[in-house]
Image (cartoon, coloured by chain):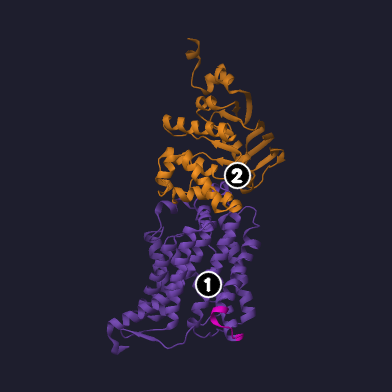
Amino acid sequence: MLRLVNVNSYYNLVHVLRNLSLHVNEGEIVTLIGANGAGKSTTLRSVSGLHQVREGNIYFKGTDITNKPTEQLVKLGIAYVPEGRQLFRPMTVFDNLELGGYQAYKIYGKKQLKVNMDSMFELFPILKERQKQYAGTLSGGEQQMLAIAMALMAKPQFLLLDEPSMGLAPLIVREIFRVISELKNETGLTVLLVEQNANAALKIADRGYVMETGKIILEQDAASLLKNQEVKRAYLGKDKRGIWE
Amino acid sequence: MSSGGSFTDLLQFIFMGLQRGSIYAMVAMGFNMIYNSTGIINLAQGEFVVLGGLMMVTLTMGLNLSIPFALMITVIFVTVIGILMERFTINPVKSPTVLRLIIITVAVSILLKGVAMCFWGKESHYMRHFTGTEPFEIMGATILPQTLWIIGILLVIVVGFALFFNFTMTGKSMRACSINRDAARLAGINDRNMVMLSFALSAGIGAVAGSIITPIIQMDYARGALLGIKGFGAAVVGGLGNSFGAVVAGLLIGIVEALGGGYISTHYMDAFALLILLVVLFIRPSGIFGSREASRLKEF
């Protein structure tokens, strides 16, 4: 469904993505793990059109989408939930969701917007209770749910998720991950997930890539990655001693 | 006026202040709209007002059209100019820094001023009042029907914009763009179109301001700069980007000007607006209604 071929991205002179290639098949959850600064978020920003790709190509369902404007990618069915809960804080939860469905509204009209919104309230009942509140007053977990719900309002086929667990309590993280795998099973949503919490991510993922300094160094199915000694040591917080003893 | 007593004088000055202040408020709203969508100050804002006024003069005095019809054509005309300005001078800029864009707006303002001088000449133009010049008397002070029109139209515009920005999808997406541009784009909102829309709206509001003030001040091609500065003052005093603040500050500046002109000296009338601007910039640079935190985050 999504294919990156030899993608190179820069921040000014800093070479962030070095000949990065990866693919995500339809209906899969693929996770990208790696240390801070490895280029995980840049990968997602490049796919979503927020960051300029200097060399290489990105294909979505066979068509070249390299450096297409973000709003056009939304039309194609790609949604991106950036890290740090990018919401419209001074606006109400209801308004935020409505704006998330901007494209659905433009194409299918008000009725579809209402349908989409009701399905979001079903998925995240807490948002229904909070719909009149300002987005900035929600708790971290609720904000993350709102951010995901906003992306889903556009009824995407492909979801890019950046650090959904950042700064959240373990219970809420579990809830969010449960929703993600539920979406995959019920609606066939394809997900590319970037996570610091590699353990949780690998548990719901089908496959995983390990990234280091802008390159993919390892690609395996999620179960094998969870057992991989190197991955365990470097990303799952189990150091050598823990493993050997 | 000596027979009227001090209260009548005061009331008279306040009426005059409201009339001038309404115009400043509308210019300030125009500034805010573009500031919110692009982060820049459009220094051609005063020229929109001038073009609106002069166009209105031609249509009503030259072609003898009815006022509502002329107003409609004027607003459409200036709105189109606003759209053209954005499409041809702002939109094509490859790496739009705040400074670059502001200098472009200076260039556009000089251009518009020159064009206005070519078409309408250097003299000031008289335009008939909307509904007669017979003043009403309120508690000894007099108020022109045109002043009531000005205040009324300001009210309509404020309410209209409040409804637009809070209850329509387009209005909400314009706000969304100014709050968090990346998030808006991720929702599928075309931010460039929203910028164009903000230029259109702010040109439109400028045209209205020019149309309704012209019967009173007699428009000429060079008025733009001073109107622009007063409006900018109102926008800054109210807190850049804050429309409610702009209206309150616009009216406030108008009233202080009128009081200063009445009680101290008419020669320094224009200076009072700038004095308020300076005082606010010294004491509270984020404006009366602007939040300090927000102003620290903005680039300008």
Q: Which chain is orange?
A: A
Q: Is residue B281 left or right of residue B96?
A: left
B225 relative position to B3: left or right: right
Q: Residue at x 44, y 43 (%)?
A: A127
Q: Quick one: which chain is purple? A: B
As helix, strand or loop, the secondary structure at mark 1 comes to helix
Residue at the (61%, 22%) spot, across then down: A221
Q: Say left or right for B209 vs B284.
A: right
**Residue A135 belongs to the span the image colors magenta:** no
Q: Residue furthest bottom?
A: B3
Q: Are marks 2 and 1 on the same chain?
A: no
- Considering depth in this image, is A198 or B47 the residue closer to the camera? A198
x and y, in percent, of residue A115 in the image: 53, 47
**Residue denoted by label 1:** B225
Residue B180 appears in the picture as rendered: no
Please state the horizontal and vertical placement of residue A4, each as a whole percent of the image: 68, 34
| Viewer-side label of 2, 1 | 2
The kind of residue on which mark 1 rests is Ala
Report the Cα–Cα distance between label 2 and label 1.
38 Å
Q: Residue at x 57, y 58 (%)?
A: B195
Kind of residue at disc 2 = Leu
Q: Which residues, given as a range, are shown in magenta? A: B62-69
Residue under label 2: A50
Q: Chain of mark 1?
A: B
Is B64 contained in the magenta span? Answer: yes
Give the secondary structure at mark 2: loop
Q: Position of residue A125 (x, y in %)?
A: 43, 40
**In this view, B228 is above or below A58:** below
Q: Nearer the viewer, residue A11 or B52?
A: B52
